[in-house]
Amino acid sequence: MGTEKRATGVFSVEQPLWRAVSAFRLLTVVYAVGRYAGNAHHYTHPAAAWAYMAVLTLWTFATVRVFSTKARCGWWWLWADLALIVAGILLTRSFDQTASVDANDVTLPTVRAAATVLGFAVMGGWRPAGAAGLLIGLANIAERGRVTSSNAHNIVLLMVAGVAIGYVIELARASEQTLARALEIQAVTRERERLARDIHDGVLQVLAMVQRRGAEVGGEAAEIGRMAGEQEIALRALIAEGLVPNPSYEAPRRPRRRSDPGEPQDLRALLTPLAGSRVTLSAPGTPVLLPGRAASELSAAVSAAVDNVRKHAGEQAHAWILVEDEPDGVVVSVRDDGPGFAQERLGEAEQEGRLGVSQSIRGRLRDLGGSAEISSAAGQGTEVELRVPRQRVERGSTQ
């Protein structure tokens, strides 16, 4: 908690608050010394009062590093600081003239007491801050010998400020923990989506091919194909279930995995292997350069779209890949002359655990900050348009 930044990438509220406590202690002790210097001629025992102010000043400056971070500061330091403040309040009447006490109603620590309450608020929230404020208030009443309008006003302000600041700090900590938890769940979900894409592009495609070929060959191969089909269904269900974030899941405590963007790559070179007798590739005559990760993910999404043409439109279907290098991004369209499908079929397929479109295509483009538009109608073929904003890709790929 005392670090500047958490492993999740969320800036902690702790360190800035402790720095504020340390700075406030210094400012208030300087103010207290200056305030006493202006009223020292009223004191019956100015030498003793100066001795206390010297101790308070030395203590405050000596513990600057202690009160600058929670890792160094503990409850013992806070209680010692509170004891020194309460002692100064109670000693004020012994050092000051009675007339001056009634006239100025100022104790030796003055606003330095507020810094102590702030330390309790940052350490433990509103309850310890309220307790510290109450003890300081009781010490003020004991020093005066009665409740006056002035010290009652100061006590109320100190209590309200301590409780309010402590409560806000508790809310900030709770919000920080909630955000960190949400980021952990998001990271786990993204990792599951990536694994789902890899499985779909590899294992599921092989199982589907074995099922299809087995049914065509017949005999023992048909039984193997049937078993492959069952495994494909079970694996799709497992992937679909695993992609639902589980709030009770404990994310592994490990550094975030960062993708190496690598050198810029020519998207045309990555898409060329997809061209064939039934796949036509049309691309600009000049290189279409993208950061390495963006080019790889976009080409993988295009490959998934071409695989879907072969799988759903049939081996005889023809596909056309068009690459457009625009000033603000790269657009790749994959169009086929297959039978097409109704638009609502995409949602039904995702519910059935068929995640080729949602993860292998749309998931990849979403991770790149782009979009994937799929349009189709029965008897009119299918067109997939993949758009990657160039500026967002370049910025995101360097993180």
Image (spheres, rainbow, N blue to C red):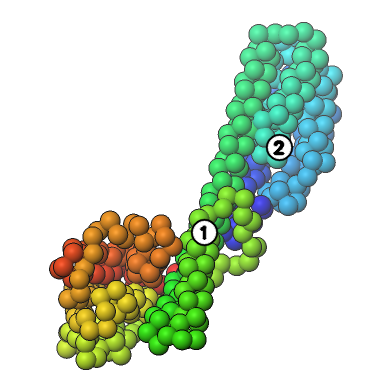
Residue at which label 2 appears = 124
Left-right relation of 154 to 324: right
Judge the density around disc 2: few (<14), some (14-19), many (≥20) Cα neighbours within 10 Å: some
- Above or below, 106 relative to 69: above
Q: Quadrant of residue 304?
A: bottom left
Name the element at disc 1.
Answer: helix
Residue at which label 1 appears = 241
- For the residues bearing labels 2 and 1, Cβ distance under 8 angstroms: no
Q: Nearer the viewer, residue 38 or 72?
A: 72
Left-right relation of 80 to 42: right
Q: Residue at x 52, y 73 (%)?
A: 231
Q: Quadrant of residue 347?
A: bottom left
Left-right relation of 299 to 66: left
Image location (x, y in percent) of residue 323: 20, 79
Image location (x, y in percent) of residue 23: 63, 43
Mark 2 or mark 1, which is nearer to you? 1
- Above or below, 188 relative to 112: below
Which label's residue is closer to the chain start, 2 or 1? 2
Q: Residue at x 36, y 61 (%)?
A: 349
Left-right relation of 339 to 308: left
- Above or below, 272 relative to 331: below
For badge 1, the amino acid type reads Glu
Q: CA distance from mark 2 to mark 1?
A: 41 Å
Q: Can residue 23 be seen in this snapshot?
A: no
Name the element at disc 2.
Answer: helix
Instruction: Quadrant for the C terminus, please.
Output: bottom left
Q: Residue at x 21, y 91 (%)?
A: 277
Q: Nearer the viewer, residue 44 or 311?
A: 311
Q: In the orientation shown, which residue stands out farthest toward the left?
A: 380
Image location (x, y in percent) of residue 150: 65, 12
For badge 2, the amino acid type reads Gly
Image location (x, y in percent) of residue 138: 77, 18
